[in-house]
Amino acid sequence: MIKKLTPISLLAVLLFLIVPADKTSASSYEDGTYNITANALHIDKDEPSVAADYINETAEVIVENGEMNLQVTVPKSEEFSLYSLKKQGDAETKEEDDNNLYYSFSLTEQDKENAMINVITSYEVPSMDLVHEDVEFRFQLEGLDKIKQATGNNKDHESEENSNNENEENINDDESVTNDESDSDDAAATISGNDSDEGKDGAKQENPKTGDEAPIILFTFILIISGVLLTRKLAVR
């Protein structure tokens, strides 16, 4: 028995190690855009980073098809030029327009629980002739509780209610039809009874005897004996 269970146990452990635990399932959260606050802090202390003065605290978490992405806005400035910003371990995702740079970072379930992600940036301060590359800091995320859990069961509940309503309507329709048929049958029986009991002159007539007085008990006894004999014959075979 132990030899048979060993391969199954190994397979279970292998699947547990392979399946990622921090991925967000496609039905965990409702799709939408949620406004949060992203505070830029030093990598090793709870104090604002130098980049905090140049990155908008107001940020967005965009949930689409089960994936969460944080988007921060960096206004373009001649005093401070941020030319790289990415989450540790991920590739950089950046968009821009005439006024702002928009950086996106993927969020896992673990990031959401920790309300914190580590990032790396490179920036330049032209007035000071200062260039810093690969500077680490953190985004502390506030307001992640605004992200709504998916409510897929509501659709099932609505579907169930509609189904119940349709069933009730069908039952009511069936009862109505049955009642109508019953009333029709009663009316027909009444008319038929009146026709059989009354003659053309309206006098009540008695039904004549048919003369069929066959002994039903005898036929029943014969039928029972035949059944017993047939059963015993089949049992012997």
Image: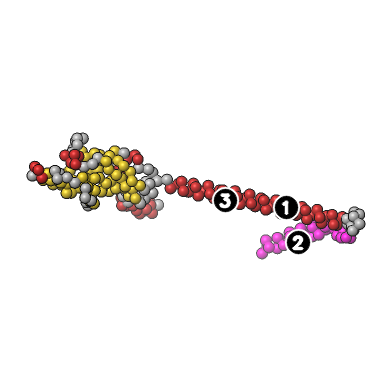
Q: Earlier in the sequence, mark 3 or mark 1?
A: 3
Task: Tell me the distance, in whole angstroms, between the alpha carbons under discs 1 and 2.
Answer: 41 Å
Task: Identify residue for label 3.
Answer: 166
Q: Residue furthest front?
A: 98
Residue at the location (89% across, 58% down)?
200
115 is higher (above) or lower (below) than 26: above
Q: Which region of the structure is painted magenta? A: 210-237
Task: Identify residue for label 2.
Answer: 226
Task: Identify residue for label 1.
Answer: 182
Q: Is residue 167 left or right of residue 209?
A: left
Residue 60: x and y in percent read 29, 44
233 is higher (above) or lower (below) than 42: below
Q: Residue furthest left?
A: 129
Q: Residue furthest bottom?
A: 237
Q: Amino acid at mark 3?
A: Glu
User: Which of the two marks, 1 or 2, is nearer to us in this view?
Assistant: 1
